[in-house]
Amino acid sequence: MTEVARRTAYAIALPLLLVTAWWFATADSTSFYWPSLQSILEAFVDTWTLDRVQQDVLPSLGRLLVGFSLAVVIGVLMGLAIGSSDWLRETLEPPLEFLRAIPPPVLVPVIMLFAGIGDGMKIAVIVSGCVWPVLLNTVEGVRGIDPVLRETATSYRLGRRRRITSLLLRAASPQIVAGARQALAIGIILMVISEMFAATNGLGFTIVQFQRSFAIPQMWSGVLLLGLIGVALSLLFRLVEIRVLAWYHGHRASQRKA
Amino acid sequence: MAAATTSAAAGTRLSLRLPTTAGARGAAGLLGLVLLIEGLPRLGVVDAAYFPPFTEMLSALREEAATSSFWSSLGDTVRGWALGLAIAVIAGCAVGMVIGMSSFLRAATATTIEFLRPIPSVALIPVVVLLYGTSMVSTLLLVVYASFWQIVVQVMYGVQDIDPVAAETARSYRFSRIGRTRHVVWPTTLPYAITGFRLAAAVALILEVTGELVIGSPGLGNDIALAQSAGAVDTMYALVLVTGLLGVTVNLLARAVEHRALHWHPSVRGVTA
């Protein structure tokens, strides 16, 4: 019990300290740009009503979800194909390295030309940025498969399907998940950027509107919300990862013990 | 012997006819990409008004390269990237080492770091715009924030990975604190720090260009936004190509740094051997 109490104390002490410091440091702030934490929190409650959430937050998250899922599916499929064939990998590696090296946000104006400023543009931007970490990690994961496993699969004459589901995807999944984690971080950035650059609704759009109309506490509350969404999505991802990779973490733990 | 020579000769003959080495295939891949960019608009698959052929992008690039504003934008982007990365590396290594070496600090800061790290750096854009306008400082803060976490976390992992036997040996030989840091902590941490550096170098470039694009601080990103709003489509694509080349250079540079700094490490020795 004391152990649990000690851990909890460690976990919450510093965050509590920082928030308290913020609260008191800005408590009677007269600075226009740094409103008091109290007014930010009040603005938070007033600003992010159910209506607002439905109008601006959910569309943003929806685009992120669709774009991210598409990127994972495309990345894994292409990664499986490229990783399984030496000549395909050697041919496509330099062009892919180049395309990957283009900072994804510069694709916002490019894709706007094709897709306007609607949902399609934003989803396309998110996909075009998220697909690379997944693709490259899948290729590496497939290439790194233990040759003994490969040969075992061959001598058991696993069919194509079984080979993909039980060997390739399984063995590459730790790398795929690592790639997907990177992709999620990029996806959130692109979600916000595409809305800040050109949009009529969405989280990024709303926050920039607040900033331009000098609604400072509201703007800060938006920044806070964006931070909370980032943290929540990364926690959610961790939960999914623990489930999906339970076998892998167990395997690693038993290896470490041995 | 004779059989070996003939088969070797056959091998060379075959490789003359078919490019079988990885390099040749890679070159073919790049050529294919260029042909694709050239061919899609020429064949009318995509509208040339939106996606000009490769040769037009190149001639736009040639025009750009003749202007001094292009080179000063490129300079701004590279300078912002390098400065932001340098600040993040120094601060990240220092903070990561201090936190990593003390189990108390590690336990006390764990939740705070877990909370601050996933905050998307672009969330800070309105704040920095408000405080610093469209100056270079705004973008610099984004770059530093985003790359700092990559390095801190890697350095912390590295410090925790120290072999306890090595640490205790150093202690029983009465190494000073500085000696322990220099001879035990540093060599173990360096590979992790370098990995962090490589990730941070790429992230820093992304955020540098993002800042320029969205905030409007001087640099290639800003030029892309201007070209787009002016309808100079081929110039825009030329600049996008330049940012891609910059990205490739950054990746190669980071890999070269890794090789130099870790030439003694088994992972690199294995690659070169």
Image (cartoon, grey):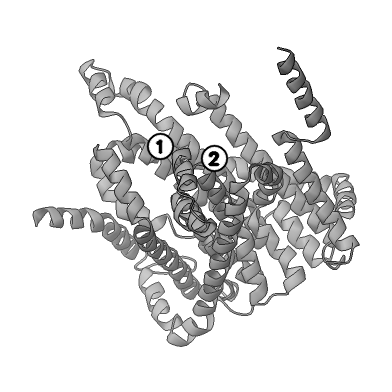
Of B218 and A23, the residue lying toward us: B218
Q: Residue furthest top?
A: B1
Q: Residue at x 68, y 42 (%)?
A: A87
Q: Nearer the viewer, residue B137 or B247?
A: B247
- Disc 2 and disc 1: Cα gap in Å? 17 Å
- State the image quarter where residue B259 is shown: top right
Quadrant that contains the C terminus of chain B = top right
Q: Which mark is residue B60?
A: none
B64 vs B149, left or right, is right
Report the chain holding disc 1: B
Q: Look at label 1 and name its amino acid.
A: Ala
The residue at 42%/83% (across/down) is A46
In this rendering, the answer to whether A183 lies above or below B182 is below
Chain label for disc 2: B
| Front position in the image: B146 or A54 | A54
Residue B94, numbered circle: 1
Q: Please state, as top left, top right, bottom left or bottom right, where the N terminus of chain B lies in the image.
A: top right
Disc nearest the viewer among 2 and 1: 2
Task: Judge the density around disc 1: few (<14), some (14-19), many (≥20) Cα neighbours within 10 Å.
Answer: some
Q: Residue furthest bottom?
A: A51
Q: Is residue B52 visible?
A: no
Could you say whether the residue bearing mark 2 is in a helix, strand or loop? helix
Marks 2 and 1, the one that precedes in the sequence: 1
* Residue at image mark 2: B198
